[in-house]
Amino acid sequence: LAKYKIISFGLGQIGRSIAKLVLSRPEEFELIGAIDTDPELVGKDISELLFLPRRTGIRVRPVGEDLVASADAILDATSSFLSDSIDHLLNFCEEGVDVVSTCEELSYPWLSHKEEAERLDAASRKNGVTLLGAGVNPGFVMDALAITLSGACAKVSKVNATRVLDASKRRLSFQKKVGIGMTPDEFETQLKSGTFGHVGLSESIAMTCAAMGVGVDKVEQRVEPKIAEGPLNTEHFGRLSKGSVIGLIQDAKGYANGKEVANYHIQMYVDAEDPRDEIELLGEPPIKLMIPGGTPGDPATAAIIVNSVPRVVEAQPGLMTLKDLRPAASLMAP
Ligand SMILES: NC(=O)c1ccc[n+]([C@@H]2O[C@H](COP(=O)([O-])OP(=O)(O)OC[C@H]3O[C@@H](n4cnc5c(N)ncnc54)[C@H](OP(=O)(O)O)[C@@H]3O)[C@@H](O)[C@H]2O)c1
Protein backbone atom coordinates (compact mmCIF):
# COMPACT_ATOMS: atom_id res chain seq x y z
CA LEU A 1 0.00 0.00 0.00
CA ALA A 2 1.15 3.54 -0.77
CA LYS A 3 1.39 5.72 2.32
CA TYR A 4 0.00 9.21 1.78
CA LYS A 5 1.34 12.27 3.60
CA ILE A 6 -1.64 14.33 4.77
CA ILE A 7 -2.23 17.84 6.07
CA SER A 8 -5.47 18.63 7.85
CA PHE A 9 -6.60 22.18 7.05
CA GLY A 10 -9.35 23.52 9.32
CA LEU A 11 -9.84 21.83 12.66
CA GLY A 12 -13.47 22.36 13.56
CA GLN A 13 -15.50 19.27 14.37
CA ILE A 14 -15.26 17.91 10.84
CA GLY A 15 -11.54 18.63 10.45
CA ARG A 16 -10.91 16.89 13.77
CA SER A 17 -12.88 13.81 12.68
CA ILE A 18 -10.83 13.77 9.49
CA ALA A 19 -7.51 14.10 11.37
CA LYS A 20 -8.54 11.38 13.82
CA LEU A 21 -9.44 9.00 11.02
CA VAL A 22 -6.13 9.70 9.28
CA LEU A 23 -4.22 8.96 12.50
CA SER A 24 -6.21 5.76 13.03
CA ARG A 25 -5.01 4.32 9.69
CA PRO A 26 -1.20 4.52 9.98
CA GLU A 27 -0.66 1.82 7.36
CA GLU A 28 -2.14 4.09 4.68
CA PHE A 29 -1.72 7.64 5.96
CA GLU A 30 0.77 9.82 7.79
CA LEU A 31 -0.52 13.06 9.25
CA ILE A 32 2.33 15.52 8.72
CA GLY A 33 0.60 18.74 9.68
CA ALA A 34 -2.48 20.54 10.92
CA ILE A 35 -3.40 24.14 10.10
CA ASP A 36 -6.13 26.46 11.38
CA THR A 37 -6.75 30.20 11.67
CA ASP A 38 -8.21 30.00 15.19
CA PRO A 39 -5.63 31.45 17.64
CA GLU A 40 -7.15 29.26 20.38
CA LEU A 41 -6.04 26.17 18.47
CA VAL A 42 -2.66 27.28 17.10
CA GLY A 43 0.26 25.77 19.04
CA LYS A 44 -1.74 22.94 20.59
CA ASP A 45 -0.68 19.34 20.03
CA ILE A 46 -3.39 17.81 17.91
CA SER A 47 -3.81 15.02 20.51
CA GLU A 48 -5.42 17.66 22.80
CA LEU A 49 -8.09 18.46 20.21
CA LEU A 50 -8.73 14.81 19.48
CA PHE A 51 -8.65 13.61 23.11
CA LEU A 52 -5.91 11.12 22.32
CA PRO A 53 -4.02 9.50 25.19
CA ARG A 54 -0.56 10.26 23.72
CA ARG A 55 1.02 13.37 22.20
CA THR A 56 1.49 13.16 18.46
CA GLY A 57 4.15 15.87 18.14
CA ILE A 58 1.96 17.56 15.52
CA ARG A 59 1.12 21.07 16.61
CA VAL A 60 -1.59 23.15 14.99
CA ARG A 61 0.13 25.76 12.82
CA PRO A 62 -1.22 29.07 11.59
CA VAL A 63 -1.97 29.60 7.91
CA GLY A 64 0.99 30.70 5.81
CA GLU A 65 3.79 28.57 7.20
CA ASP A 66 5.87 26.72 4.67
CA LEU A 67 4.41 23.24 5.11
CA VAL A 68 1.86 22.54 2.45
CA ALA A 69 4.17 21.50 -0.40
CA SER A 70 5.47 18.44 1.46
CA ALA A 71 2.04 16.76 1.56
CA ASP A 72 0.54 14.32 -0.96
CA ALA A 73 -2.92 15.67 -0.15
CA ILE A 74 -4.41 18.46 1.89
CA LEU A 75 -7.81 17.85 3.47
CA ASP A 76 -9.71 21.14 3.68
CA ALA A 77 -12.60 21.46 6.16
CA THR A 78 -13.02 25.20 6.55
CA SER A 79 -16.05 26.60 4.75
CA SER A 80 -19.12 25.82 2.67
CA PHE A 81 -18.51 28.72 0.30
CA LEU A 82 -16.13 29.23 -2.59
CA SER A 83 -15.87 32.93 -1.77
CA ASP A 84 -14.12 31.90 1.48
CA SER A 85 -12.15 29.04 0.01
CA ILE A 86 -10.96 30.09 -3.43
CA ASP A 87 -7.81 31.87 -2.24
CA HIS A 88 -6.47 28.95 -0.24
CA LEU A 89 -7.53 26.46 -2.93
CA LEU A 90 -5.57 28.46 -5.53
CA ASN A 91 -2.62 28.53 -3.12
CA PHE A 92 -2.70 24.76 -2.74
CA CYS A 93 -2.67 24.47 -6.53
CA GLU A 94 0.44 26.65 -6.68
CA GLU A 95 2.07 24.51 -3.99
CA GLY A 96 1.41 21.47 -6.21
CA VAL A 97 -0.69 19.53 -3.67
CA ASP A 98 -3.84 17.50 -4.37
CA VAL A 99 -6.88 18.63 -2.39
CA VAL A 100 -10.01 17.02 -1.04
CA SER A 101 -12.36 19.61 0.45
CA THR A 102 -15.64 19.55 2.35
CA CYS A 103 -16.58 22.88 0.70
CA GLU A 104 -20.12 22.22 -0.48
CA GLU A 105 -19.94 24.69 -3.36
CA LEU A 106 -16.80 22.96 -4.67
CA SER A 107 -18.64 19.62 -5.02
CA TYR A 108 -20.04 20.73 -8.40
CA PRO A 109 -19.32 24.41 -9.02
CA TRP A 110 -20.09 24.33 -12.74
CA LEU A 111 -23.75 25.43 -12.40
CA SER A 112 -23.69 28.28 -9.86
CA HIS A 113 -19.99 29.28 -9.77
CA LYS A 114 -18.79 28.74 -13.30
CA GLU A 115 -16.17 31.48 -13.24
CA GLU A 116 -14.59 30.15 -10.03
CA ALA A 117 -14.79 26.62 -11.43
CA GLU A 118 -12.90 27.67 -14.55
CA ARG A 119 -10.21 29.49 -12.50
CA LEU A 120 -9.73 26.50 -10.22
CA ASP A 121 -9.70 24.04 -13.10
CA ALA A 122 -7.09 26.11 -14.98
CA ALA A 123 -4.89 26.52 -11.87
CA SER A 124 -5.04 22.84 -10.98
CA ARG A 125 -4.20 21.74 -14.53
CA LYS A 126 -1.34 24.24 -14.78
CA ASN A 127 0.17 22.93 -11.56
CA GLY A 128 -0.57 19.25 -12.18
CA VAL A 129 -2.86 18.81 -9.17
CA THR A 130 -6.37 17.44 -8.61
CA LEU A 131 -9.06 19.32 -6.68
CA LEU A 132 -12.14 17.55 -5.36
CA GLY A 133 -15.13 18.68 -3.29
CA ALA A 134 -16.71 15.81 -1.36
CA GLY A 135 -18.65 14.89 1.76
CA VAL A 136 -21.79 13.08 2.82
CA ASN A 137 -24.14 15.51 1.12
CA PRO A 138 -23.29 17.01 -1.26
CA GLY A 139 -20.90 14.31 -2.32
CA PHE A 140 -22.56 11.03 -1.52
CA VAL A 141 -26.24 10.59 -0.64
CA MET A 142 -27.98 12.79 -3.18
CA ASP A 143 -25.42 12.56 -5.98
CA ALA A 144 -22.73 9.84 -6.03
CA LEU A 145 -25.19 7.23 -4.76
CA ALA A 146 -27.92 8.29 -7.21
CA ILE A 147 -25.43 8.23 -10.08
CA THR A 148 -24.26 4.72 -9.13
CA LEU A 149 -27.85 3.46 -8.94
CA SER A 150 -28.65 4.89 -12.35
CA GLY A 151 -26.12 2.49 -13.87
CA ALA A 152 -28.76 -0.23 -13.42
CA CYS A 153 -31.42 1.68 -15.39
CA ALA A 154 -31.83 1.59 -19.16
CA LYS A 155 -33.31 5.11 -18.98
CA VAL A 156 -33.92 7.67 -16.24
CA SER A 157 -36.54 10.38 -16.64
CA LYS A 158 -36.35 11.96 -13.19
CA VAL A 159 -34.45 11.71 -9.90
CA ASN A 160 -36.19 12.21 -6.56
CA ALA A 161 -34.26 12.26 -3.31
CA THR A 162 -35.19 12.74 0.33
CA ARG A 163 -32.96 13.09 3.37
CA VAL A 164 -34.53 13.31 6.82
CA LEU A 165 -32.24 13.78 9.79
CA ASP A 166 -32.61 14.46 13.46
CA ALA A 167 -30.60 17.68 13.80
CA SER A 168 -30.25 17.23 17.57
CA LYS A 169 -27.76 14.43 16.84
CA ARG A 170 -25.45 16.64 14.74
CA ARG A 171 -22.55 18.92 15.74
CA LEU A 172 -23.16 22.42 17.12
CA SER A 173 -22.03 24.30 13.98
CA PHE A 174 -24.56 22.26 11.97
CA GLN A 175 -27.35 22.97 14.47
CA LYS A 176 -26.64 26.70 14.18
CA LYS A 177 -26.67 26.42 10.40
CA VAL A 178 -30.20 25.01 10.39
CA GLY A 179 -31.46 27.76 12.71
CA ILE A 180 -32.17 25.86 15.93
CA GLY A 181 -33.08 28.31 18.71
CA MET A 182 -33.88 31.25 16.41
CA THR A 183 -37.16 33.10 16.29
CA PRO A 184 -39.00 32.87 12.95
CA ASP A 185 -38.02 36.52 12.28
CA GLU A 186 -34.33 35.81 12.90
CA PHE A 187 -34.63 32.82 10.58
CA GLU A 188 -36.10 34.99 7.81
CA THR A 189 -33.31 37.57 8.26
CA GLN A 190 -30.65 34.86 8.06
CA LEU A 191 -32.30 33.42 4.98
CA LYS A 192 -32.03 36.76 3.20
CA SER A 193 -28.24 36.76 3.81
CA GLY A 194 -28.02 34.01 1.17
CA THR A 195 -25.51 32.00 3.24
CA PHE A 196 -27.98 30.14 5.40
CA GLY A 197 -29.59 26.73 5.19
CA HIS A 198 -28.22 23.58 3.63
CA VAL A 199 -25.64 24.36 0.96
CA GLY A 200 -25.30 21.81 -1.81
CA LEU A 201 -28.74 20.82 -3.10
CA SER A 202 -28.29 22.58 -6.43
CA GLU A 203 -24.75 21.15 -6.68
CA SER A 204 -26.09 17.61 -6.02
CA ILE A 205 -28.84 18.00 -8.62
CA ALA A 206 -26.53 19.47 -11.25
CA MET A 207 -23.86 16.80 -10.72
CA THR A 208 -26.34 13.93 -10.79
CA CYS A 209 -28.01 15.16 -13.96
CA ALA A 210 -24.66 15.94 -15.63
CA ALA A 211 -23.55 12.35 -14.97
CA MET A 212 -26.73 11.20 -16.76
CA GLY A 213 -25.98 13.46 -19.70
CA VAL A 214 -28.34 16.32 -18.88
CA GLY A 215 -27.27 19.91 -18.31
CA VAL A 216 -29.52 21.49 -15.67
CA ASP A 217 -30.56 25.05 -16.64
CA LYS A 218 -31.79 26.14 -13.24
CA VAL A 219 -32.54 24.92 -9.75
CA GLU A 220 -35.40 26.48 -7.78
CA GLN A 221 -35.13 26.26 -4.02
CA ARG A 222 -37.43 26.92 -1.09
CA VAL A 223 -36.39 26.93 2.57
CA GLU A 224 -38.86 27.02 5.46
CA PRO A 225 -38.32 26.97 9.19
CA LYS A 226 -39.60 24.03 11.21
CA ILE A 227 -41.41 25.49 14.21
CA ALA A 228 -41.67 23.84 17.65
CA GLU A 229 -45.24 22.75 18.34
CA GLY A 230 -44.59 22.73 22.09
CA PRO A 231 -41.71 23.38 24.50
CA LEU A 232 -38.72 21.04 24.16
CA ASN A 233 -35.26 20.60 25.70
CA THR A 234 -32.12 20.78 23.58
CA GLU A 235 -28.51 19.99 24.43
CA HIS A 236 -26.98 23.23 23.14
CA PHE A 237 -29.81 25.75 23.17
CA GLY A 238 -31.53 24.90 26.47
CA ARG A 239 -35.30 24.80 26.70
CA LEU A 240 -37.01 26.10 23.57
CA SER A 241 -40.55 27.39 23.77
CA LYS A 242 -43.44 26.68 21.43
CA GLY A 243 -42.97 28.78 18.28
CA SER A 244 -39.14 28.61 18.28
CA VAL A 245 -37.29 27.43 15.19
CA ILE A 246 -36.03 23.85 15.61
CA GLY A 247 -34.52 23.37 12.15
CA LEU A 248 -35.52 23.63 8.52
CA ILE A 249 -37.19 22.02 5.56
CA GLN A 250 -35.62 22.63 2.17
CA ASP A 251 -36.84 21.72 -1.32
CA ALA A 252 -35.09 22.01 -4.65
CA LYS A 253 -36.28 21.30 -8.15
CA GLY A 254 -33.94 21.02 -11.11
CA TYR A 255 -35.04 21.82 -14.67
CA ALA A 256 -33.55 20.95 -18.03
CA ASN A 257 -35.12 22.29 -21.22
CA GLY A 258 -38.14 23.44 -19.21
CA LYS A 259 -38.80 19.96 -17.80
CA GLU A 260 -38.49 19.03 -14.13
CA VAL A 261 -35.73 16.41 -13.94
CA ALA A 262 -35.00 16.35 -10.19
CA ASN A 263 -36.96 16.92 -7.00
CA TYR A 264 -34.90 16.95 -3.80
CA HIS A 265 -36.27 17.31 -0.28
CA ILE A 266 -34.43 17.72 3.02
CA GLN A 267 -35.79 17.83 6.57
CA MET A 268 -33.25 18.70 9.24
CA TYR A 269 -34.75 19.47 12.61
CA VAL A 270 -34.77 18.42 16.25
CA ASP A 271 -36.43 15.03 16.78
CA ALA A 272 -37.32 14.61 13.08
CA GLU A 273 -39.22 11.34 12.80
CA ASP A 274 -38.16 8.40 10.68
CA PRO A 275 -34.65 9.61 9.73
CA ARG A 276 -33.69 8.14 6.37
CA ASP A 277 -32.13 8.69 2.98
CA GLU A 278 -34.16 7.85 -0.09
CA ILE A 279 -33.24 7.89 -3.74
CA GLU A 280 -35.89 7.20 -6.33
CA LEU A 281 -35.08 6.94 -10.01
CA LEU A 282 -38.06 7.14 -12.32
CA GLY A 283 -37.26 5.27 -15.51
CA GLU A 284 -36.80 1.82 -16.92
CA PRO A 285 -36.71 0.01 -14.60
CA PRO A 286 -37.64 2.39 -11.78
CA ILE A 287 -35.39 1.93 -8.74
CA LYS A 288 -35.87 3.03 -5.17
CA LEU A 289 -33.25 2.83 -2.43
CA MET A 290 -33.83 3.62 1.22
CA ILE A 291 -31.20 3.82 3.95
CA PRO A 292 -33.12 3.44 7.21
CA GLY A 293 -31.79 5.82 9.87
CA GLY A 294 -29.94 7.79 7.17
CA THR A 295 -26.22 7.95 6.47
CA PRO A 296 -24.52 9.27 9.62
CA GLY A 297 -23.40 12.70 8.42
CA ASP A 298 -20.25 13.63 10.30
CA PRO A 299 -18.42 10.27 10.38
CA ALA A 300 -19.47 9.59 6.79
CA THR A 301 -18.04 12.94 5.70
CA ALA A 302 -14.70 12.20 7.35
CA ALA A 303 -14.63 8.74 5.75
CA ILE A 304 -15.47 10.00 2.26
CA ILE A 305 -12.81 12.73 2.49
CA VAL A 306 -10.11 10.32 3.69
CA ASN A 307 -11.12 7.49 1.34
CA SER A 308 -10.94 9.94 -1.57
CA VAL A 309 -7.22 10.59 -1.05
CA PRO A 310 -6.05 7.68 -3.25
CA ARG A 311 -8.57 8.80 -5.89
CA VAL A 312 -7.22 12.35 -6.17
CA VAL A 313 -3.63 11.19 -6.08
CA GLU A 314 -4.20 8.75 -8.99
CA ALA A 315 -6.45 11.15 -10.96
CA GLN A 316 -5.51 13.36 -13.86
CA PRO A 317 -4.93 17.02 -12.95
CA GLY A 318 -7.93 19.33 -12.89
CA LEU A 319 -11.01 20.26 -10.91
CA MET A 320 -12.80 16.94 -10.53
CA THR A 321 -16.17 16.08 -9.07
CA LEU A 322 -17.26 12.77 -7.60
CA LYS A 323 -18.89 11.84 -10.88
CA ASP A 324 -15.46 11.90 -12.56
CA LEU A 325 -13.54 9.57 -10.24
CA ARG A 326 -13.69 5.91 -9.32
CA PRO A 327 -15.93 5.56 -6.25
CA ALA A 328 -14.02 5.98 -3.00
CA ALA A 329 -13.82 2.75 -1.04
CA SER A 330 -12.89 1.99 2.51
CA LEU A 331 -10.39 -0.69 3.46
CA MET A 332 -11.75 -3.82 5.02
CA ALA A 333 -10.32 -4.18 8.50
CA PRO A 334 -10.05 -7.78 9.65
N1 LIG B 1 -20.06 18.24 1.92
C1 LIG B 1 -20.54 17.78 3.06
O1 LIG B 1 -21.28 16.80 3.08
C2 LIG B 1 -20.13 18.38 4.37
C3 LIG B 1 -20.35 17.64 5.55
C4 LIG B 1 -19.94 18.19 6.75
C5 LIG B 1 -19.37 19.47 6.78
N2 LIG B 1 -19.21 20.17 5.64
C6 LIG B 1 -18.62 21.50 5.66
O2 LIG B 1 -17.30 21.42 6.15
C7 LIG B 1 -16.95 22.65 6.78
C8 LIG B 1 -16.32 22.35 8.13
O3 LIG B 1 -17.30 21.92 9.06
P1 LIG B 1 -17.15 22.24 10.63
O4 LIG B 1 -18.45 21.95 11.26
O5 LIG B 1 -15.94 21.58 11.14
O6 LIG B 1 -16.96 23.83 10.57
P2 LIG B 1 -16.41 24.82 11.68
O7 LIG B 1 -16.82 24.36 13.02
O8 LIG B 1 -16.80 26.18 11.22
O9 LIG B 1 -14.81 24.67 11.61
C9 LIG B 1 -14.04 25.23 10.60
C10 LIG B 1 -12.62 25.44 11.14
O10 LIG B 1 -11.80 25.93 10.07
C11 LIG B 1 -11.15 27.15 10.50
N3 LIG B 1 -10.96 28.01 9.33
C12 LIG B 1 -11.88 28.80 8.73
N4 LIG B 1 -11.34 29.40 7.66
C13 LIG B 1 -10.05 29.00 7.59
C14 LIG B 1 -8.99 29.25 6.69
N5 LIG B 1 -9.14 30.06 5.65
N6 LIG B 1 -7.81 28.65 6.91
C15 LIG B 1 -7.63 27.80 7.95
N7 LIG B 1 -8.60 27.53 8.84
C16 LIG B 1 -9.81 28.10 8.65
C17 LIG B 1 -12.10 27.73 11.52
O11 LIG B 1 -11.41 28.65 12.34
P3 LIG B 1 -12.21 29.91 12.95
O12 LIG B 1 -13.08 29.33 14.01
O13 LIG B 1 -11.13 30.80 13.43
O14 LIG B 1 -13.00 30.49 11.80
C18 LIG B 1 -12.55 26.48 12.27
O15 LIG B 1 -11.60 26.08 13.23
C19 LIG B 1 -18.25 23.45 6.87
O16 LIG B 1 -18.29 24.44 5.89
C20 LIG B 1 -19.32 22.41 6.64
O17 LIG B 1 -20.51 22.96 6.10
C21 LIG B 1 -19.58 19.64 4.43
Image (cartoon, rainbow, N blue to C red):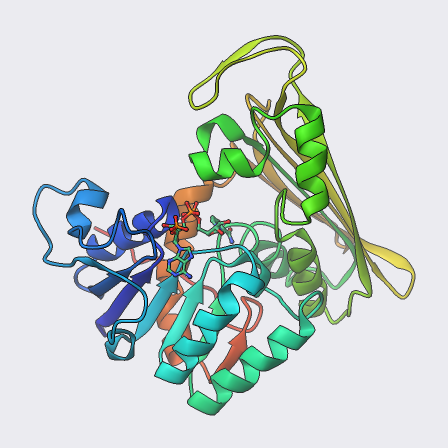
Is 211 rendered above or below residue 334? below
Name the residue furthest right. Answer: 258
Where residue 181 sits, quadrant-wise, is top right
| Relative horizontal placement of residue 307, taking residue 285 as reference (left or right) | left
State the image coordinates of residue 210 (x, y, percent, origin top left): 70, 69
Residue 262 lies, in percent from the top left, at 77, 53
> Which residue sits at x=70%, y=25%?
184
Mark yes or no: residue 265 visible.
no
Residue in the foreground of this view, choosing between 101 and 289? 101
In the rendered image, residue 127, in percent from the top left (x then y), is placed at 43, 88
User: At 43% across and 70% down in the image, what residue appears?
Assistant: 88
Whole-percent x, y for residue 226 in the image:
68, 25
Residue placed furthest toward the bottom: 126
Viewer can see residue 39: yes
Counting labels gives: 0
**Where, by quadrant of the figure, is residue 104 drawn?**
bottom right
